[in-house]
Amino acid sequence: MKKNMKKRLIRALAAASLGGLLMAGPVMGAEQAASTALEQNQNVQASLTKEAGKKADEKRQEIISEAVSALQETFNALKALEAGKKEEALKALANATGKLELVVARDPKLAFAPVDVSMTTFDVLATAQDVTMARKEVMRLLKEGNLPAARELLNSLRSEVVVSVAAIPLATYPDAIKAVTPLIDQGKVEEAKAALEAALSTLVVTRHVIPLPLLRVDEALVIAEVLAEKKDRDEKENQALENALDAAVEQLKLAEALGYGTHADYEVLQDQIREIREKVSGGKSGTGFFEKLKQSLLELKADIFGSKEEQKPKAADEKKGTTEK
């Protein structure tokens, strides 16, 4: 990678702050703006962590206790075989088989039984322009055949929480476990251990992505909506509203540059923000301005996360409509 590219990305990582975009208006001094930006950024990051944690908790609720027990019994069987305790291994395998049969009996159509959920955060607090430059650099490195450098740079272009769900494949795992018992009975301990290890290696991990820029858009819109509904905003409040909408626009640009969704998705969102700007221009206020935008964001996040649950507006929101003052 070129040295100036590295320096630019490092500066971007160090300097980026949503709090600064939202709160550091022209009326603030440098010291006050920095302090306010830091405090606001900490609040935003705490909110983002909470939102991502909610998604992970939703997946944790899908974990099947019997499947977890079956997996643990598989490990117990392997440990017993390594200790030369064949009877304990056979008992553990019988328990594992029974647990899996219970899972299948409860839901014969279930293909994968979730057993574990983990959450990992990756972030690059850069601008959309920085990401676009880095993408061009990746293409240059690929053309040169420098795959290691391209891979390293490309892997850094992520701003997301990844919720990973490990699951037992019910079409193959139970039969693989059952096939180990005859091996133990025949005294083929090493083969039995290898078969158990092979079965454990078939666990399926599904990764669900939560783009952080889109969560930051949510945070900016919370501020903007409160201000948009306020009657008789003063000059500072009008500026704060503009800052919040600007922050949302920049985060949308970043999300698009990072490849979370299609250009068409973001055209719709940017158009909806322009409509909001028109409705609040000249100090105008009202309610319901953000409903379409919030629904569009909700649908985009659900598509990226891989969620198929139905998203319905609250009854109160349906009646709320849009009013201007």
Image: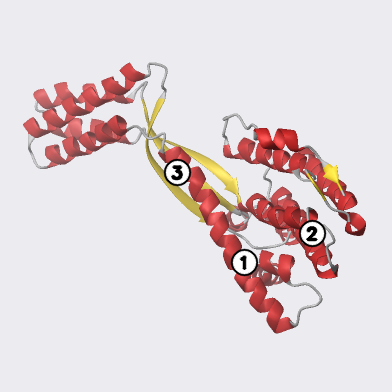
| Percent of width and height locating residue 57 | 45, 43
Q: Which residue lies at the image location 30% right of the left edge and 31% below the top edge?
A: 67
Residue 79 sits in quarter: top left
SS at badge 2:
helix
SS at badge 1:
helix
Q: Residues within 10 Å of mark 2 (few under 14, many from 20)?
A: some
Q: Which mark is residue 158?
A: none
Q: Residue furthest right?
A: 282
Q: Which residue lies at the image location 22% right of the left edge and 22% below the top edge?
A: 178
Instruction: Name the residue nearer the viewer: 90 or 289.
Output: 289
Under mark 2, the amino acid is: Asp
Judge whether 250 appears above or below 171 on screen.
Answer: below
Q: CA distance from mark 1 to mark 3?
A: 24 Å
Under mark 3, the amino acid is: Asp
Residue at mark 1:
41
Residue 86 sits in quarter: top left
Q: Can you see residue 140?
A: no
| Percent of width and height locating residue 231 | 82, 57
* 258 left or right, relative to 96: right
Q: Which residue lies at the image location 28% right of the left edge and 30% below the top edge?
A: 66
Residue at mark 2:
246
Judge whether 196 appears above or below 55 on screen.
Answer: above
